[in-house]
Amino acid sequence: MNIADKINDLYSRFGRLPGITIECHKDLVAIGVSNSAASAEIFLQGAQISRFQRKGGSPVLFLSKQCIYKEGQALRGGVPICWPWFGVLEKNNELITAQYKNVDTASIMNHGFVRLMEWQLDNIEISNNNLTVLEFSLDLNDDNNNLAPVFYKKYWPFTTKLSYRVEIGKSLTASFVVSNKGSEPFSYTSALHSYFAVDHIKNAIISGFSKADYVDALDEWKQKTQLEDIAFNKEVDRIYKSSPHKIILSDRNRFIMLASQGSESTVIWNPWVDKSRQLSQFDDDEYQSMVCIETANALDDAVTLATGEEHRLMLTIS
């Protein structure tokens, strides 16, 4: 389906709902949402939330000014979905890497492939003026997707259904469900790779991790212990283990509460000066206005699903 047909189909199904707009950003189609509590935007590619803003407030999520909105390129910012592996595939534990023994993983993309695939918008529910709910799904057995079936079947030969529910109101809730519809078990890692806007990274404080253990990806993956709140004066790339289910992000202007379910690991990331110069779709100085707090199933927090089982990864931002 070409982009014009997509827009026409979405408009015929949802375009007359109050507060819903069907938007085109170069090669990509997005759904705009506005209600009395907040506004938001979600792209079909990757079901990626790109914007959430409470009425009268400033943007909660960071989205780079350098995004190119091209098919097959995940946006730098918002909330990309990482699945069925997190980060560099070879850095995942043996449960994950064992599924790819016959595949050349050296040049494979980071963070899996579903953030590049076209998701189906199944339903929009407007229960009241303060809440809008969007439901997405991705059937990996459907060959009519924008990512070549030969590619994702090579890297994911399991019969799987993915569902994603996004609730937009005074809070933003994202619920990612993986269902094993096949006859054999599988394992995966994943993350809701959330980019948050801050007034300046040097003012950002993340609370809730005191005495938590983490793996430092910038120091030979050594395990360390967080002794106090997380602050930033250099590049940070850490995976926190047995992480808290409630986290507070603050800067000089506000507090943001993050609550999670189905996750025992959290990734904290800021690229700082040198790494920012290497990143695609990212200005050299944009590290100053963002921090990633990623609700994850990473490292030993990998998920294994038997036939008929499902797992829900949920994040609420308030």
Image (cartoon, rainbow, N blue to C red):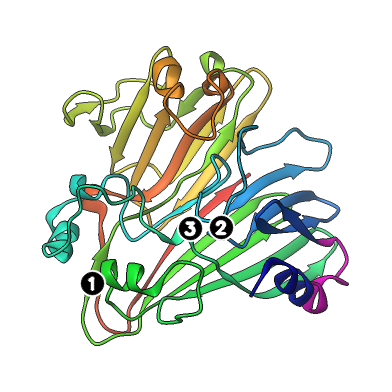
Is residue 231 within the magenta segment? no
Q: Residue beneath label 3, please?
A: 116
Q: Residue beneath label 1, please?
A: 186
Instruction: Quadrant for residue 154, please give it.
Output: bottom left
Q: Amino acid at mark 1?
A: Phe
Q: Residue beneath label 2, please?
A: 174
Q: Amino acid at mark 2?
A: Ala
What residue lies at 61% left-to-right and 33% top-to-bottom? 66
The local crowd at label 1, few if under 14, some if 14 to 19, many if 20 or more residues have their Cα within 10 Å, is: many
What residue lies at 27% left-to-right and 45% top-to-bottom? 88
CB within 8 Å, label 3 to label 1: no
Q: Position of residue 6 (x, y in %)?
A: 70, 71
Q: Position of residue 176 (x, y in %)?
A: 48, 63
Tally of numbered discs: 3
The local crowd at label 2, few if under 14, some if 14 to 19, many if 20 or more residues have their Cα within 10 Å, is: many
Does residue 231 appear in the picture of this structure?
A: no
Of residues 130 and 136, the one drawn nearer to the viewer in this rendering: 136
What residue lies at 45% left-to-right and 80% top-to-bottom? 143
Q: Position of residue 56 (x, y in %)?
A: 84, 36
Of residues 305 and 8, the one drawn nearer to the viewer in this rendering: 8
Dot placed on the residue nearer the N-terminal end, 2 or 1: 2
Does residue 189 appear in the picture of this structure?
A: yes
Q: Quadrant location of the N terminus?
A: bottom right
Q: Which residues are magenta?
A: 11-21
57 with respect to 137 (left or right): right
